Image: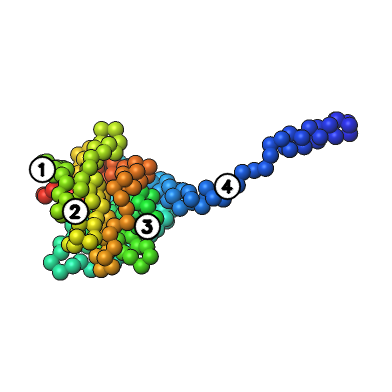
Amino acid sequence: MTDQDALLVKDVMKRAADDLGPLPDLVPEAVVRGRRRRARTRLALTTSAFGAVTLGVLGAAVLSGGGSGPGPASVTEVAAAQAPHRTPVHVEPSPGETMEGGLSGLPAGERQRLEDFQQRAAVALDEALPDTVGEIRPVDSTVARYQGGADGNVFTVDFTVRPVGGRAPEECRNVPQKRLTCVKAELAEGVEARLRRAAVNSMQTTSTSMAFEFGNSTVLISVSPDEGKGVSAPVTVQQLLDGVRASGLLDVVRYADEHPVLQKQVSVQGG
């Protein structure tokens, strides 16, 4: 290429760049989407690691003829190191309260599976719930409970996926005198959710919950108020519905349906 040709190419490139105009300001949108995008990234990483654990354990069992060995533990350790870790919260049960899905006393392998499940569920719940609930962390004593916190308030989040026990779901009904409202909405194809807003121990504080059937399981997602502060659950039923639809939480539900983390239900919860 001659010097004249080179100058011609340079001039064409400059004029083409000038025609493009300035780059758009991406900062405002990035600020708005930042937290949810980070949550989706964390969920993707956790999902990959969680899948690696499952495949690794199954593969090791096949190769070893079903016997025990160091293989699955090694896979679990590697996957746990890859997944983003959320420090569990220790919560003492209330007097007389029986916490289902307890982690104490379980075989080491099963406890590790449930703790890995909690990590994945916490990230998915964080993606599904609005920022007003705060970052979601697992509770260290049970696979069924999580906790969020924001602006000095603490919100209990229950997330249960339980094998169906033969009972029909509770009717979706409104009871105005108890500040109980219930609406039905399509969560996903073939999945109808019942969304409730209800007073909890006081007419001044309310919880928000969603219940639905998925595969062979019943699912409950519930955000409780901070009763000590008199602050209701900071999420509407529409926010909960939209958040679960847009998040990866149904993938977590699917895993728990295929690989149960709780025993078969003996009573109706959340309708």
Q: Answer few, some or many: residues within 10 Å of disc 2's Cα (few below 14, many 20 plus, some between 14 and 19).
A: some
Which label's residue is closer to the chain start, 2 or 4? 4
Which label's residue is closer to the chain start, 1 or 2? 1
Q: In this view, does 215 lie above or below 127?
A: above
Q: Do labels 3 and 4 touch, CB within 8 Å? A: no
Q: Residue 63, how many percent across, how many down?
A: 32, 42
Q: Residue 136, how many percent across, how many down?
A: 35, 57
Q: Distance between the residues labelled 3 and 4?
A: 24 Å
Give the structural element (helix, strand or loop) at label 3.
Answer: helix
Which label's residue is closer to the chain start, 3 or 4? 4
Give the structural element (helix, strand or loop) at label 1.
Answer: loop
The residue beneath circle 1 is 167
Q: Write the residue at 60% across / 47% down.
A: 25
Q: Residue 179 carries which label?
A: 2
Which label's residue is closer to the chain start, 1 or 4? 4
Q: Is residue 170 visible?
A: yes
